[in-house]
Image: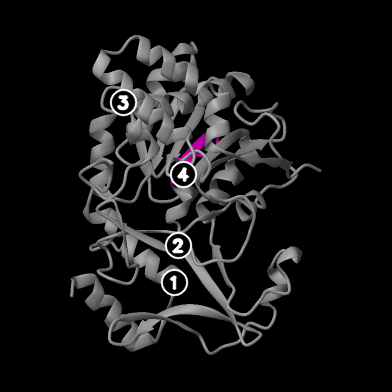
């Protein structure tokens, strides 16, 4: 039994079963024993590999996207560039290198990173040394500057935001919680939620018994959108999940590039749940539009990833060409590739013209 498990056990013994979101938050962000506080989980030597670690092409295209959106904004002299959950800083390093193609963009950039892990902050500091004059770190979105246009990106950021789970049993909705048996176990809170079904999309009612619905607090996103609404700008989120709200228990744990049990060895495995892109897009309003989601394959395809792969292959040594092709397939191919499961959704101030990568995408939030 590790130290975090002992602490959570004591908490449950004292206060009773805890919500799934509280369990996730403790596992991922406990200030002493949390998963992201105690380790660098990225890459072959960690627990999982994200798109920026697969290929430089991903970060490069995100950088070009940011530079082009800045141009569409009228090329303001100052732009607050934000990455939420920047990992090792790999995406941002590739993005800023590629964005040099648009004169003036890097001179306008003021870089801000939303990162709570001191260990990962140090990795980011090392990765981005000499790339930008200075970096400001934030533990939450609400401390970001609110006096300039903002461009925000978040790759595999939202899936790690804690979710609450609810289950319908015998015609009644209950919250799922984490309690104690011999080990940690899921159970249903005795309290009924009589109005819960009214909060679901109409097409999901009436729900069948056994249905599980997940809902996450999106405070970091709303903090970003409030700044876009006030000062202009855009945000891009790329993550894995479903385009429409639906039922299902999607909570999962990953350790050593393999699936693990979410309630075992807390703090030693990554915990995520699929992103509900319909719920994410619902944050749009009359001043900030939501655009998408579109598949990662479609988004990167519109940005020119295949042409970029061709250029890299032409300039690569023979042994590297096959690796570039494999990386391309991982990014845009069907399962087990990321092309369809991963999706992109953008938010844009109402005054912005259409954004690159989203031709034909659904737009919500208009008056």
Cβ atoms at labels 3 and 2 below 8 Å apart: no
Disc 4 to disc 3, how far (Cα)?
A: 18 Å
Q: Earlier in the sequence, mark 1 or mark 4?
A: 1
Q: Position of residue 110 (x, y in %)?
A: 43, 28
Q: Range of the magenta residues? A: 145-156
Q: Which residue is mark 2?
A: 162
Q: Residue at x 64, y 36 (%)?
A: 348
Q: Is residue 10 above or below residue 158?
A: below
Q: Quick one: SS at disc 3?
A: helix
Disc 1 to disc 3, how far (Cα)?
A: 40 Å
Q: Which residue is mark 3?
A: 323
Q: Position of residue 350 (x, y in %)?
A: 72, 35
Callout 3 crowding tier (Cα within 10 Å): few <14, some 14–19, many ≥20: some
Q: Earlier in the sequence, mark 2 or mark 1?
A: 1
Frontmost residue, 363 versus 83: 363
Which residue reaches farthest right? 367
Q: Is residue 348 above or below residue 249?
A: above
Q: Residue at x 64, y 54 (%)?
A: 244
Q: Is residue 119 magenta?
A: no
| Residue 135 in view of the camera | no
Q: Which residue is mark 1?
A: 20
Please tell me the numbered disc located at residue 343. none
In which quadrant of the rendered view does residue 128 lie? top left
Q: Is residue 114 above or below residue 64?
A: below
Q: Earlier in the sequence, mark 4 or mark 3?
A: 3
Disc 1 to disc 4, how far (Cα)?
A: 28 Å
Q: Which residue is mark 4?
A: 335
Q: Is residue 174 above or below residue 30?
A: below
Cβ atoms at labels 4 and 2 below 8 Å apart: no
Cβ atoms at labels 2 and 1 below 8 Å apart: yes
> Which quarter of the image is occupied by the N terminus?
bottom left
């Amino acid at each position: 039994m590790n130290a975090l498990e002992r602490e959570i056990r004591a908490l449950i013994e004292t206060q009773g079963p805890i919500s799934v979101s509280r369990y996730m938050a403790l596992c991922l962000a406990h200030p002493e024993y949390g998963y992201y506080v105690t380790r660098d989980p990225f890459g072959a030597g960690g627990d999982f590999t994200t798109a920026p670690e697969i290929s430089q092409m991903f970060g490069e295209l995100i950088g070009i996207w940011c530079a082009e959106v800045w141009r569409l904004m009228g090329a303001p002299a100052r732009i607050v560039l934000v990455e939420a959950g920047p990992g090792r800083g790999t995406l941002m390093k590739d993005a800023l290198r590629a964005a040099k193609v648009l004169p003036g963009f890097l001179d306008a950039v003021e870089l801000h990173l939303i990162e709570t892990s001191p260990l990962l902050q140090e990795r980011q500091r090392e990765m981005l040394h000499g790339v930008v004059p200075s970096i400001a770190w934030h533990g939450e979105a609400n401390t970001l500057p609110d006096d300039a246009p903002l461009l925000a990106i978040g790759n595999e950021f939202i899936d790690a935001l804690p979710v609450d789970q609810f289950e319908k049993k015998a015609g009644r909705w209950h919250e799922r919680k984490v309690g104690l048996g011999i080990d940690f176990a899921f159970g249903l809170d005795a309290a009924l939620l009589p109005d819960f079904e009214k909060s679901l999309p109409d097409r999901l009612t009436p729900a069948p018994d056994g249905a599980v619905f997940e809902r996450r607090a999106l405070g970091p996103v709303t903090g970003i959108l409030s700044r876009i609404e006030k000062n202009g700008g855009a945000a891009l989120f790329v993550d894995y999940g479903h385009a429409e709200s639906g039922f299902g228990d999607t909570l999962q744990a990953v350790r050593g590039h393999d699936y693990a049990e979410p309630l075992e060895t807390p703090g030693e495995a990554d915990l995520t749940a699929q992103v509900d892109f319909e719920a994410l897009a619902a944050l749009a309003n009359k001043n900030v539009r939501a655009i998408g989601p579109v598949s990662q394959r479609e988004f990167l395809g519109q940005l020119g990833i295949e042409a970029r792969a061709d250029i890299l292959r032409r300039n690569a040594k023979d042994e590297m060409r096959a690796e570039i092709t494999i990386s391309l397939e991982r990014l845009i191919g069907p399962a087990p590739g990321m092309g369809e499961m991963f999706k992109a959704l953008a938010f844009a101030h109402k005054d912005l013209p259409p954004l690159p990568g989203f031709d034909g995408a659904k737009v919500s939030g208009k008056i």
